[in-house]
Image (cartoon, rainbow, N blue to C red):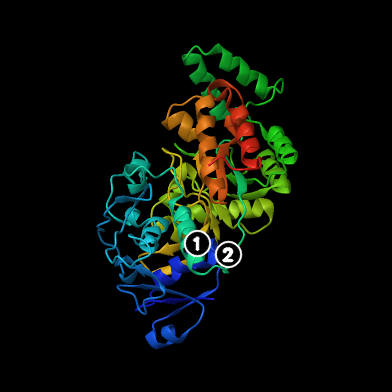
Amino acid sequence: MVLIYTHKITKRIQYIFKFYFGQLLGLEFKFTSDIEFFKASQGIKISYARKPIIGNEIFFNCAGLLFETGVEGQELGFFKYDGQTVFYPVYDKSSALPYDMFAAAFFLLTRYEEYLPYMRDKFGRFDAKESVSFKQGFLHLPVVNLWAEKLKKIIKERYKNVQFVERKFNFTPTIDIDSAYSYRLKGTVRTAGGFLKALMKFDFKEILERFQVITGLIKDPFDTYDLQLRLQKQYDLRPIYFILLGDYGKFDKNIPASSRQFQTLIKSLADYAEVGIHPSFDSNRNNEKLKVEIERLSKILNREITRSRQHFLMLNFPHSYRNLINLDITDDYTMGYASEPGFRAGTCDSYFFYDLDLETATKLKIHPFTVMEGTYKDYLYLGAEESLTRIKKLIDQVKAVDGTFISLWHNESLSNSKRWIGWQKVYEEMIKYALAEGRNV
Protein backbone atom coordinates (compact mmCIF):
# COMPACT_ATOMS: atom_id res chain seq x y z
CA MET A 1 0.00 0.00 0.00
CA VAL A 2 1.26 3.45 -0.96
CA LEU A 3 0.28 6.27 1.38
CA ILE A 4 0.18 9.66 -0.37
CA TYR A 5 0.15 12.86 1.62
CA THR A 6 -1.14 16.07 0.14
CA HIS A 7 -2.41 19.10 1.98
CA LYS A 8 -5.63 19.15 -0.08
CA ILE A 9 -7.18 16.11 -1.73
CA THR A 10 -8.79 17.50 -4.88
CA LYS A 11 -10.69 15.71 -7.64
CA ARG A 12 -7.82 16.49 -10.01
CA ILE A 13 -5.31 14.83 -7.68
CA GLN A 14 -7.53 11.79 -7.21
CA TYR A 15 -7.93 11.48 -10.99
CA ILE A 16 -4.28 11.71 -12.04
CA PHE A 17 -2.86 9.69 -9.14
CA LYS A 18 -5.37 6.94 -9.87
CA PHE A 19 -4.16 6.88 -13.46
CA TYR A 20 -0.49 6.72 -12.47
CA PHE A 21 -0.53 4.52 -9.39
CA GLY A 22 -3.64 2.46 -10.03
CA GLN A 23 -3.53 1.94 -13.80
CA LEU A 24 0.05 2.36 -15.00
CA LEU A 25 1.90 1.01 -11.95
CA GLY A 26 -0.76 -1.30 -10.52
CA LEU A 27 -0.22 -0.23 -6.90
CA GLU A 28 -2.77 0.08 -4.14
CA PHE A 29 -2.75 3.56 -2.64
CA LYS A 30 -4.67 5.94 -0.44
CA PHE A 31 -4.52 9.63 0.39
CA THR A 32 -4.18 11.48 3.67
CA SER A 33 -4.00 15.09 4.73
CA ASP A 34 -3.26 14.10 8.33
CA ILE A 35 0.41 14.82 9.00
CA GLU A 36 0.54 12.82 12.24
CA PHE A 37 -1.06 9.80 10.58
CA PHE A 38 1.40 10.11 7.69
CA LYS A 39 4.37 10.24 10.08
CA ALA A 40 3.21 7.19 12.05
CA SER A 41 2.41 5.01 9.04
CA GLN A 42 4.65 2.23 7.78
CA GLY A 43 5.27 1.24 4.17
CA ILE A 44 5.68 3.33 1.06
CA LYS A 45 5.16 7.01 1.79
CA ILE A 46 4.96 9.74 -0.82
CA SER A 47 4.21 13.40 -0.31
CA TYR A 48 2.90 15.74 -2.97
CA ALA A 49 3.20 19.14 -1.38
CA ARG A 50 5.04 22.45 -1.26
CA LYS A 51 7.72 21.03 1.04
CA PRO A 52 8.68 17.63 2.52
CA ILE A 53 6.58 16.48 5.46
CA ILE A 54 8.93 14.20 7.40
CA GLY A 55 12.07 14.24 5.30
CA ASN A 56 12.44 10.54 4.60
CA GLU A 57 9.45 10.08 2.31
CA ILE A 58 9.57 10.30 -1.47
CA PHE A 59 8.77 13.95 -2.00
CA PHE A 60 7.31 15.50 -5.13
CA ASN A 61 7.19 19.27 -5.11
CA CYS A 62 3.84 20.39 -6.53
CA ALA A 63 2.90 23.08 -8.99
CA GLY A 64 -0.49 24.69 -8.56
CA LEU A 65 -2.56 23.14 -11.36
CA LEU A 66 -4.04 20.23 -9.43
CA PHE A 67 -5.25 22.53 -6.65
CA GLU A 68 -7.03 24.91 -9.03
CA THR A 69 -10.54 24.79 -10.45
CA GLY A 70 -11.71 26.06 -13.79
CA VAL A 71 -9.58 26.78 -16.83
CA GLU A 72 -7.12 29.63 -17.20
CA GLY A 73 -3.89 30.37 -19.03
CA GLN A 74 -0.91 28.36 -17.78
CA GLU A 75 2.78 29.19 -17.41
CA LEU A 76 4.21 25.85 -18.53
CA GLY A 77 7.93 26.65 -18.31
CA PHE A 78 9.37 24.08 -20.70
CA PHE A 79 12.92 22.86 -20.12
CA LYS A 80 15.11 19.83 -20.78
CA TYR A 81 15.59 17.14 -18.16
CA ASP A 82 17.20 13.73 -18.64
CA GLY A 83 17.10 14.16 -22.42
CA GLN A 84 13.39 15.01 -22.55
CA THR A 85 11.35 18.19 -22.75
CA VAL A 86 9.32 18.58 -19.54
CA PHE A 87 7.19 21.34 -18.03
CA TYR A 88 5.72 22.68 -14.82
CA PRO A 89 9.13 23.22 -13.18
CA VAL A 90 9.38 23.05 -9.38
CA TYR A 91 12.17 24.53 -7.32
CA ASP A 92 12.55 22.62 -4.06
CA LYS A 93 15.85 20.78 -4.48
CA SER A 94 14.68 17.90 -2.29
CA SER A 95 11.97 17.02 -4.83
CA ALA A 96 12.44 13.64 -6.52
CA LEU A 97 11.98 15.42 -9.86
CA PRO A 98 12.55 19.05 -10.89
CA TYR A 99 9.13 19.17 -12.58
CA ASP A 100 5.58 18.27 -11.59
CA MET A 101 4.89 15.16 -13.64
CA PHE A 102 1.39 14.86 -12.19
CA ALA A 103 0.35 18.37 -13.25
CA ALA A 104 1.95 17.89 -16.66
CA ALA A 105 0.14 14.59 -17.22
CA PHE A 106 -3.16 16.14 -16.13
CA PHE A 107 -2.63 19.00 -18.61
CA LEU A 108 -2.09 16.51 -21.45
CA LEU A 109 -4.73 13.90 -20.60
CA THR A 110 -7.52 16.40 -20.08
CA ARG A 111 -6.49 18.32 -23.22
CA TYR A 112 -6.44 21.45 -21.08
CA GLU A 113 -5.14 23.57 -23.94
CA GLU A 114 -8.18 22.69 -26.06
CA TYR A 115 -10.43 24.48 -23.57
CA LEU A 116 -8.44 27.68 -24.12
CA PRO A 117 -8.86 29.94 -27.19
CA TYR A 118 -7.12 28.56 -30.30
CA MET A 119 -7.02 28.91 -34.08
CA ARG A 120 -9.24 26.24 -35.65
CA ASP A 121 -8.44 24.45 -38.90
CA LYS A 122 -10.78 24.62 -41.92
CA PHE A 123 -13.04 21.97 -40.41
CA GLY A 124 -13.22 23.66 -37.01
CA ARG A 125 -10.80 21.28 -35.32
CA PHE A 126 -7.87 21.78 -32.98
CA ASP A 127 -4.88 21.14 -35.23
CA ALA A 128 -1.78 19.26 -34.14
CA LYS A 129 0.44 22.23 -34.91
CA GLU A 130 -1.42 24.27 -32.27
CA SER A 131 -0.48 21.80 -29.54
CA VAL A 132 2.37 22.21 -27.08
CA SER A 133 3.39 18.64 -27.86
CA PHE A 134 4.04 19.50 -31.50
CA LYS A 135 5.59 22.89 -30.82
CA GLN A 136 7.95 21.43 -28.21
CA GLY A 137 8.82 18.38 -30.31
CA PHE A 138 7.45 15.51 -28.21
CA LEU A 139 4.21 14.63 -30.01
CA HIS A 140 5.89 11.43 -31.23
CA LEU A 141 6.57 10.27 -27.65
CA PRO A 142 4.12 8.76 -25.11
CA VAL A 143 5.58 11.11 -22.51
CA VAL A 144 3.04 10.34 -19.78
CA ASN A 145 4.01 6.67 -19.97
CA LEU A 146 7.68 7.57 -19.96
CA TRP A 147 7.15 9.65 -16.82
CA ALA A 148 5.44 6.64 -15.25
CA GLU A 149 8.61 4.67 -15.89
CA LYS A 150 10.58 7.34 -14.03
CA LEU A 151 8.12 7.18 -11.15
CA LYS A 152 8.49 3.42 -11.02
CA LYS A 153 12.27 3.72 -10.91
CA ILE A 154 12.17 6.30 -8.11
CA ILE A 155 9.92 4.08 -5.98
CA LYS A 156 11.94 0.96 -6.74
CA GLU A 157 15.20 2.61 -5.67
CA ARG A 158 13.75 3.43 -2.25
CA TYR A 159 11.54 0.38 -1.72
CA LYS A 160 13.29 -2.66 -3.19
CA ASN A 161 10.50 -5.19 -2.64
CA VAL A 162 7.64 -3.30 -4.20
CA GLN A 163 5.79 -5.23 -6.93
CA PHE A 164 4.41 -3.42 -9.95
CA VAL A 165 1.76 -4.68 -12.35
CA GLU A 166 3.12 -6.63 -15.31
CA ARG A 167 2.19 -4.73 -18.44
CA LYS A 168 1.99 -6.17 -21.94
CA PHE A 169 2.01 -4.51 -25.35
CA ASN A 170 -1.31 -4.68 -27.20
CA PHE A 171 -2.33 -3.95 -30.77
CA THR A 172 -5.84 -2.92 -31.78
CA PRO A 173 -6.53 -2.30 -35.49
CA THR A 174 -9.54 -0.09 -36.19
CA ILE A 175 -11.23 0.56 -39.52
CA ASP A 176 -13.56 3.41 -40.42
CA ILE A 177 -16.22 2.76 -43.03
CA ASP A 178 -16.74 6.23 -44.49
CA SER A 179 -17.82 4.86 -47.84
CA ALA A 180 -18.61 1.16 -47.92
CA TYR A 181 -18.40 1.01 -51.72
CA SER A 182 -16.97 3.25 -54.40
CA TYR A 183 -19.73 2.68 -56.98
CA ARG A 184 -22.25 0.20 -55.63
CA LEU A 185 -25.55 1.01 -53.87
CA LYS A 186 -25.27 4.77 -54.43
CA GLY A 187 -28.73 5.20 -55.93
CA THR A 188 -29.74 6.42 -59.38
CA VAL A 189 -29.04 10.13 -58.89
CA ARG A 190 -25.58 9.73 -57.37
CA THR A 191 -24.63 7.05 -59.92
CA ALA A 192 -25.70 9.24 -62.83
CA GLY A 193 -23.82 12.16 -61.31
CA GLY A 194 -20.72 10.00 -61.00
CA PHE A 195 -20.84 9.02 -64.67
CA LEU A 196 -21.34 12.66 -65.68
CA LYS A 197 -18.47 13.89 -63.53
CA ALA A 198 -16.11 11.28 -64.99
CA LEU A 199 -17.25 12.11 -68.52
CA MET A 200 -16.56 15.82 -67.99
CA LYS A 201 -13.02 14.89 -66.95
CA PHE A 202 -12.69 12.54 -69.94
CA ASP A 203 -11.87 9.82 -67.43
CA PHE A 204 -12.96 6.89 -69.58
CA LYS A 205 -11.13 4.42 -67.38
CA GLU A 206 -13.35 5.31 -64.42
CA ILE A 207 -16.46 5.23 -66.60
CA LEU A 208 -15.59 1.70 -67.65
CA GLU A 209 -14.76 0.62 -64.10
CA ARG A 210 -17.97 2.10 -62.73
CA PHE A 211 -20.03 0.35 -65.43
CA GLN A 212 -18.31 -3.00 -64.82
CA VAL A 213 -18.90 -2.75 -61.06
CA ILE A 214 -22.56 -1.78 -61.38
CA THR A 215 -23.22 -4.58 -63.85
CA GLY A 216 -21.46 -7.11 -61.61
CA LEU A 217 -18.59 -7.84 -63.97
CA ILE A 218 -15.90 -6.86 -61.44
CA LYS A 219 -15.67 -6.25 -57.72
CA ASP A 220 -16.09 -2.76 -56.29
CA PRO A 221 -12.61 -1.35 -55.46
CA PHE A 222 -13.68 -0.38 -51.91
CA ASP A 223 -14.97 -3.90 -51.27
CA THR A 224 -11.93 -5.05 -49.31
CA TYR A 225 -13.86 -6.97 -46.67
CA ASP A 226 -12.69 -10.45 -47.72
CA LEU A 227 -9.10 -9.23 -47.42
CA GLN A 228 -9.81 -7.76 -44.00
CA LEU A 229 -11.34 -11.01 -42.78
CA ARG A 230 -8.41 -13.01 -44.16
CA LEU A 231 -5.92 -10.83 -42.33
CA GLN A 232 -8.02 -10.94 -39.19
CA LYS A 233 -7.98 -14.74 -39.15
CA GLN A 234 -4.36 -15.05 -40.30
CA TYR A 235 -3.00 -12.79 -37.57
CA ASP A 236 -5.65 -13.41 -34.91
CA LEU A 237 -6.65 -9.75 -34.83
CA ARG A 238 -9.42 -8.14 -32.78
CA PRO A 239 -10.43 -5.20 -35.00
CA ILE A 240 -13.06 -2.56 -34.33
CA TYR A 241 -15.16 -1.09 -37.14
CA PHE A 242 -16.79 2.33 -37.05
CA ILE A 243 -19.72 2.76 -39.43
CA LEU A 244 -20.89 6.10 -40.85
CA LEU A 245 -24.70 6.12 -40.91
CA GLY A 246 -25.38 9.84 -41.30
CA ASP A 247 -27.64 11.35 -43.92
CA TYR A 248 -25.98 12.30 -47.20
CA GLY A 249 -24.12 15.61 -47.05
CA LYS A 250 -21.00 17.42 -48.20
CA PHE A 251 -18.76 15.47 -45.81
CA ASP A 252 -20.99 12.44 -45.20
CA LYS A 253 -21.22 10.27 -48.31
CA ASN A 254 -21.74 6.69 -47.23
CA ILE A 255 -24.37 4.28 -48.53
CA PRO A 256 -27.94 5.09 -47.36
CA ALA A 257 -28.60 3.43 -44.00
CA SER A 258 -31.86 2.07 -45.42
CA SER A 259 -30.00 -0.12 -47.94
CA ARG A 260 -30.63 -3.79 -47.11
CA GLN A 261 -27.34 -4.81 -48.70
CA PHE A 262 -25.45 -2.23 -46.63
CA GLN A 263 -27.18 -3.50 -43.51
CA THR A 264 -26.18 -7.06 -44.44
CA LEU A 265 -22.56 -5.94 -44.75
CA ILE A 266 -22.69 -4.30 -41.32
CA LYS A 267 -24.14 -7.45 -39.77
CA SER A 268 -21.45 -9.60 -41.39
CA LEU A 269 -18.72 -7.34 -39.98
CA ALA A 270 -20.31 -7.61 -36.54
CA ASP A 271 -20.13 -11.42 -36.77
CA TYR A 272 -16.34 -11.26 -36.62
CA ALA A 273 -15.48 -7.96 -34.93
CA GLU A 274 -16.65 -5.19 -32.64
CA VAL A 275 -18.69 -2.49 -34.35
CA GLY A 276 -19.23 1.09 -33.24
CA ILE A 277 -20.82 4.25 -34.59
CA HIS A 278 -18.94 6.78 -36.71
CA PRO A 279 -20.88 9.97 -35.89
CA SER A 280 -21.31 12.07 -39.01
CA PHE A 281 -19.77 15.47 -39.64
CA ASP A 282 -23.19 17.10 -39.42
CA SER A 283 -23.98 15.40 -36.09
CA ASN A 284 -21.45 17.71 -34.44
CA ARG A 285 -23.83 20.60 -35.09
CA ASN A 286 -27.00 18.67 -34.28
CA ASN A 287 -27.09 16.32 -31.32
CA GLU A 288 -30.43 14.92 -32.46
CA LYS A 289 -28.68 13.56 -35.57
CA LEU A 290 -26.16 11.79 -33.37
CA LYS A 291 -29.00 10.11 -31.51
CA VAL A 292 -30.64 9.02 -34.76
CA GLU A 293 -27.39 7.56 -36.12
CA ILE A 294 -26.72 5.56 -32.97
CA GLU A 295 -30.29 4.26 -33.04
CA ARG A 296 -29.88 3.23 -36.68
CA LEU A 297 -26.84 1.10 -35.92
CA SER A 298 -28.48 -0.31 -32.79
CA LYS A 299 -31.54 -1.35 -34.81
CA ILE A 300 -29.44 -2.95 -37.56
CA LEU A 301 -27.41 -5.02 -35.09
CA ASN A 302 -30.15 -5.43 -32.50
CA ARG A 303 -27.75 -4.51 -29.71
CA GLU A 304 -26.68 -1.56 -27.63
CA ILE A 305 -24.02 0.66 -29.22
CA THR A 306 -21.29 1.74 -26.81
CA ARG A 307 -18.27 2.56 -29.04
CA SER A 308 -17.67 5.57 -31.28
CA ARG A 309 -15.18 7.53 -33.33
CA GLN A 310 -16.03 10.93 -34.77
CA HIS A 311 -16.05 11.24 -38.58
CA PHE A 312 -13.28 13.64 -39.69
CA LEU A 313 -12.03 13.30 -36.09
CA MET A 314 -14.32 16.17 -35.12
CA LEU A 315 -13.64 16.70 -31.44
CA ASN A 316 -14.59 19.81 -29.48
CA PHE A 317 -14.08 19.94 -25.73
CA PRO A 318 -16.06 19.21 -23.71
CA HIS A 319 -19.18 19.13 -25.90
CA SER A 320 -18.34 16.15 -28.15
CA TYR A 321 -17.72 13.88 -25.20
CA ARG A 322 -20.70 15.16 -23.22
CA ASN A 323 -22.97 14.36 -26.17
CA LEU A 324 -21.64 10.81 -26.29
CA ILE A 325 -22.05 10.33 -22.56
CA ASN A 326 -25.66 11.51 -22.75
CA LEU A 327 -26.34 8.81 -25.36
CA ASP A 328 -24.70 6.02 -23.32
CA ILE A 329 -21.48 5.73 -25.32
CA THR A 330 -18.87 4.27 -22.98
CA ASP A 331 -15.76 4.10 -25.22
CA ASP A 332 -14.49 6.64 -27.75
CA TYR A 333 -11.60 6.26 -30.21
CA THR A 334 -11.30 9.81 -31.61
CA MET A 335 -8.27 10.92 -29.59
CA GLY A 336 -5.65 11.61 -32.22
CA TYR A 337 -4.85 14.19 -34.88
CA ALA A 338 -5.66 14.11 -38.58
CA SER A 339 -2.62 16.18 -39.58
CA GLU A 340 0.11 14.52 -37.50
CA PRO A 341 0.69 11.02 -36.08
CA GLY A 342 1.63 10.57 -32.45
CA PHE A 343 0.15 10.95 -29.00
CA ARG A 344 -2.40 13.76 -28.75
CA ALA A 345 -2.97 13.13 -25.05
CA GLY A 346 0.64 12.15 -24.32
CA THR A 347 -0.24 8.51 -23.65
CA CYS A 348 -0.80 5.19 -25.41
CA ASP A 349 -3.08 3.94 -22.63
CA SER A 350 -6.83 4.25 -22.40
CA TYR A 351 -8.10 6.59 -19.72
CA PHE A 352 -11.32 8.22 -18.52
CA PHE A 353 -12.43 11.63 -19.72
CA TYR A 354 -12.12 14.37 -17.10
CA ASP A 355 -14.56 17.22 -17.71
CA LEU A 356 -12.70 20.38 -16.71
CA ASP A 357 -15.78 22.58 -16.79
CA LEU A 358 -17.62 20.27 -14.38
CA GLU A 359 -14.45 19.29 -12.46
CA THR A 360 -15.30 15.63 -12.51
CA ALA A 361 -14.03 12.35 -13.89
CA THR A 362 -16.58 10.67 -16.14
CA LYS A 363 -17.24 7.05 -17.11
CA LEU A 364 -16.37 7.68 -20.78
CA LYS A 365 -13.17 5.81 -21.60
CA ILE A 366 -10.90 7.41 -24.19
CA HIS A 367 -8.78 5.13 -26.40
CA PRO A 368 -6.05 7.17 -28.15
CA PHE A 369 -4.95 6.06 -31.61
CA THR A 370 -1.38 6.62 -32.78
CA VAL A 371 -1.45 6.48 -36.59
CA MET A 372 -3.92 7.05 -39.40
CA GLU A 373 -2.98 6.18 -42.95
CA GLY A 374 -4.59 9.37 -44.28
CA THR A 375 -2.25 11.48 -42.16
CA TYR A 376 0.78 10.23 -44.05
CA LYS A 377 -0.91 10.29 -47.44
CA ASP A 378 -2.99 13.47 -47.37
CA TYR A 379 -1.29 15.72 -44.81
CA LEU A 380 2.38 14.77 -44.86
CA TYR A 381 2.36 13.77 -48.56
CA LEU A 382 4.50 10.71 -47.99
CA GLY A 383 4.72 7.55 -50.05
CA ALA A 384 3.91 4.08 -48.79
CA GLU A 385 7.50 3.05 -48.04
CA GLU A 386 8.43 6.16 -46.02
CA SER A 387 5.10 6.00 -44.18
CA LEU A 388 5.75 2.41 -43.12
CA THR A 389 9.17 3.37 -41.79
CA ARG A 390 7.64 6.11 -39.65
CA ILE A 391 4.80 3.90 -38.45
CA LYS A 392 7.31 1.30 -37.26
CA LYS A 393 9.12 3.94 -35.20
CA LEU A 394 5.87 4.81 -33.41
CA ILE A 395 5.14 1.15 -32.79
CA ASP A 396 8.59 0.92 -31.19
CA GLN A 397 7.71 3.81 -28.87
CA VAL A 398 4.53 2.07 -27.73
CA LYS A 399 6.29 -1.27 -27.27
CA ALA A 400 8.97 0.42 -25.16
CA VAL A 401 6.36 1.30 -22.52
CA ASP A 402 4.20 -1.82 -22.98
CA GLY A 403 1.28 0.28 -24.12
CA THR A 404 -1.52 -0.19 -26.64
CA PHE A 405 -0.95 0.64 -30.29
CA ILE A 406 -4.20 1.58 -32.04
CA SER A 407 -4.14 2.11 -35.80
CA LEU A 408 -6.80 3.83 -37.91
CA TRP A 409 -7.36 2.59 -41.43
CA HIS A 410 -10.19 2.78 -44.00
CA ASN A 411 -11.61 0.06 -46.20
CA GLU A 412 -10.83 2.10 -49.33
CA SER A 413 -7.11 2.43 -48.51
CA LEU A 414 -6.84 -1.36 -48.65
CA SER A 415 -8.06 -1.37 -52.28
CA ASN A 416 -4.52 -1.20 -53.66
CA SER A 417 -5.89 0.92 -56.49
CA LYS A 418 -5.64 4.51 -57.72
CA ARG A 419 -4.15 6.73 -55.02
CA TRP A 420 -3.90 3.83 -52.59
CA ILE A 421 -1.58 1.65 -54.62
CA GLY A 422 0.97 0.10 -52.25
CA TRP A 423 -0.94 0.84 -49.04
CA GLN A 424 -2.39 -2.63 -48.68
CA LYS A 425 1.18 -3.80 -48.18
CA VAL A 426 1.78 -1.04 -45.62
CA TYR A 427 -1.20 -2.28 -43.62
CA GLU A 428 -0.07 -5.90 -43.56
CA GLU A 429 3.55 -5.01 -42.81
CA MET A 430 2.34 -2.80 -39.96
CA ILE A 431 0.41 -5.75 -38.55
CA LYS A 432 3.43 -8.04 -38.80
CA TYR A 433 5.69 -5.50 -37.13
CA ALA A 434 3.23 -4.80 -34.34
CA LEU A 435 2.81 -8.50 -33.60
CA ALA A 436 6.52 -9.33 -33.80
CA GLU A 437 8.21 -10.14 -30.51
CA GLY A 438 10.79 -7.82 -29.01
CA ARG A 439 11.46 -4.10 -28.87
CA ASN A 440 13.60 -1.85 -31.00
CA VAL A 441 13.88 1.11 -28.59
Q: Of the residues shown, which amino acid type is indicated by label 2?
A: Phe
Depicted 112 relative to depicted 182: above or below: below
Q: In what element is the residue under mark 1?
A: helix
Specify whether 302 is left or right of 19.
right
Q: Residue at x 55, y 36 (%)?
A: 392
Position of 379 relative to 126 (above/below):
above
Above or below 117: residue 362 = below
Amino acid at circle 1: Lys
Let me know if residue 331 appears in the view. Answer: yes
Residue contact between numbered discs 1 and 2, judged by CB atoms under 8 Å: yes
What residue is at 48 percent from the left and 29 percent from the top?
A: 377
Q: Which residue is mark 2?
A: 164
Of mark 1 and mark 2, the one earlier in the sequence is 1
* Rendered location of residue 426, percent (x, y): 59, 30
Distance in Å between CA atoms under marks 1 and 2: 8 Å
Residue 21, percent from left and from top? 50, 67
Asked whether residue 182 is in view, the answer is no
The residue identified by callout 1 is 152
